[in-house]
Image (cartoon, grey):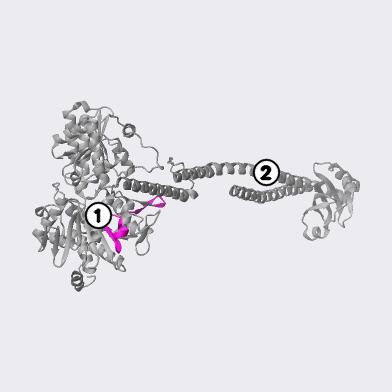
Amino acid sequence: MRLSLRLILFLVVGITLVTFFISRNEVSAEKRGLRGDLERRAAIFAESLAEIIEPAIERDSRGQLRRIVEQFENRQQLSGVIVYAADGRVLAESSSLESDFAQPALPLDRLKNDGQPVSEFLRIGDKPMHAYYLPLLGDNGLSGVLAIFHDASFIEAQSARIWRETVWHVIAQVLLVVFVTVLIIRWTIVLPISRTAQWMRDLRSGRMQPRPNLPKEDFLTPFSEEVVNLARSLNEARAAAEEEARLRETGESRWTPERLRASIQNKLQGSLFVVSNREPYMHLHRGKNIEASVPASGLVTALEPILRACDGTWIAHGSGDADRETVDRRGRLRVPPDRPEYTLRRVWLTKEEEQGYYYGFANEGLWPLCHIAHTRPTFRTSDWESYREVNRKFADTALEEMENAEQALLLVQDYHFALLPRMIKEARPDVRVAIFWHIPWPNPEAFGICPWQRDLLDGLLGADLVGFQTQAHCNNFLETVDAALESRIEWERFAVKRGDHVTLVRPFPISVDFRETQQDVGIGGPVPSQYDLRASLLKKLGTQSSFLGVGVDRVDYTKGLIERFRGIERFLEKWPVYKERFTFVQIGAPSRTNIPRYHDFLAEVEAEAARINARFAKGNWKPIVLLTRHHSHEEILPYYRAADFCMVTSLHDGMNLVAKEFVASREDCEGALILSQFTGATRELRDALIVNPYDTDQLAEAVRSALEMDSDERTTRMRRMRLNVRDHNVYRWAGNLIAELSEIRIDEAEHTLSARAGKYA
């Protein structure tokens, strides 16, 4: 209320002052205009009258002068006329001037000296007047003066009228502005803030309500954002407390972000550093603004709670077009943007380095080498050199960040940095180093194709801990090391001893963030039913159907998209009753399209979908809807919840988190999962419909089974899979990985031997 009164007072004073200055200028301009007009009229009248008066003066005919003066006496606004002789004597004057006014002083000297008319505004008695003196020139010089007097009171009357109107205008404007301001404040600020305050009170008291419309004005945007963040934090804290209480009551032991945080704080001795190619936050130009974006990645979900718990450092490639503008001179930035809790250190790569290291060696060499998907790996010496140089650049950056850390743990992510563990250990043997290999590890014969396999293996064995998705991948790695390097394999504890250094090899199957409810309680509205979602999604896609299947993948030749489409084609051939009743939506994010194999594969996928649609489509129905653009998790989630089944047909995959994301999203325990036997996820999700993606008839039969499965069986299968994903979530993965690394003992002998090799080699 006080704010409104102060604002109204400021508005009244401001409007009054502004209007006063504007009106004063307007009055001055009006006065100047009226005076100028009066002077012009006086001059014209005097010039015309002079032509008549001059002959009379020359004849010294005072009677004629008197008659002339009286003749023009009653003109509008003309107060009178006086005719003076050259010496200033009055020769004739209007009777009104004789009776009503005292004659003003005649400016005779000015008229004689200048010989020009004189115009003056003066007061005669109490009346404003205008006097115009015109010198009358004869053969011998000044023969007389003609004085014209006009009543100028109308000018002051006009000015007074303007001031009166101004006062009324000010009053009207003030009342209108105050009224509008009060309405604006009430509707756009007071009411939304009041609703927000009530919403916050409800949240604080445990009554969950949908989020109100928060103020959208620019100056209130920070307030709105902080309110949402505070509400989210409050809900998360309450949900965590309730979950912890429930787990204690039931005696369950489930990993949550809070449990992970507590575990890290208890077990982690020293500072934690993470190295990955992909950064957790990237900054992009959006018009004139810079926005922070979170790349779609399970890695961020898994590692952020760890780094937040210990105020760690994440080292990654700065790939956003505005990344350089948001860091300090050392390439550092505190993240997350809304609640900074750890440091992001960005590494800058040239286009040539990125092309050789990432697109070349990592994704045209190692990726097809490790995935048995019948795409020949390409190895170039220039790509290998770039890979080695970039690994060295990241290693130097990590060593710089760890320079002041007496005890440090380094967690390296994926196949992009196979050489980095050895580089770190040679410089800092006291650092505990782990690397997690997210993709499969092939058998020794397949990996032997790589010309630099010994260098890669030696680099990996610089780590104290090497993690894979499955035990089979661990076995393949140990067999590859046994075949390629001089070392001792300790099969009983799955370790490699090379020289005086021991590397443990362990399976850590990665997972997703499983919550009892996938929506932000109290922040979003109620979740629509499966059937409402399906109708809404299909309407947006311009089609309609009774049954819906979904696939979510990068457009990658390892994901089995062509095989999947052919399985759907075979399904419609064998069971034509589903024509015009079944639609499969494939969300396919384009990936690495500057690599020819990926660019060509995207065209193949589009052509195959078009061929099958051309064969079966009818009216506005088509069997396959292919969406080839990047979708956020929020955009994908409705498809998961609306689908009768999700299809994962990877030809080879380390884990495949899409399968687990689909299971985690199905709170209704509905829907079926069709899962390739060549994914790591099959080891855990045994209740999925396991298929060989190369067997087209088996794929078709799996689609039919998913659509026609008994409701009780479908619910039972989904419930068991959800329990597995819930108990083996991403926080458990992170906790186990960090716990294993923290417990590794760095032998003094190894430390001394490595130190002799030269620090920071």
Where residue 299 sits: x, y (%)? 28, 52
Task: Find out whether the residues at labels 1 and 2 contact each other: C-beta distance under 8 Å.
Answer: no
Q: Where does the magenta region start and end?
A: 263-290
Horizontally, residue 516 falls left or right of residue 378, namely right
Can residue 214 be seen in the rendering of this structure?
Answer: no
Q: Judging from the image, what secondary structure is the residue with disc 2 in?
A: helix
Q: Which residue is mark 2?
A: 171
- Foreground pick, 571 / 665: 665
Q: Amino acid at mark 1?
A: Asn
Q: Report the residue that reaches farthest toward the top.
A: 577
Callout 1 environment at 10 Å: few (<14), some (14 to 19), or many (20+)? some
Q: Which residue is mark 1?
A: 736
Where residue 395 sits: x, y (%)? 25, 64
Q: Judging from the image, what secondary structure is the residue with disc 1 in?
A: helix
Q: Quadrant of residue 531?
A: top left
Q: Of circles 1 and 2, which is in front?
A: 1
- Reply yes or no: does residue 88 show up in magenta: no
- Foreground pick, 388 / 699: 699
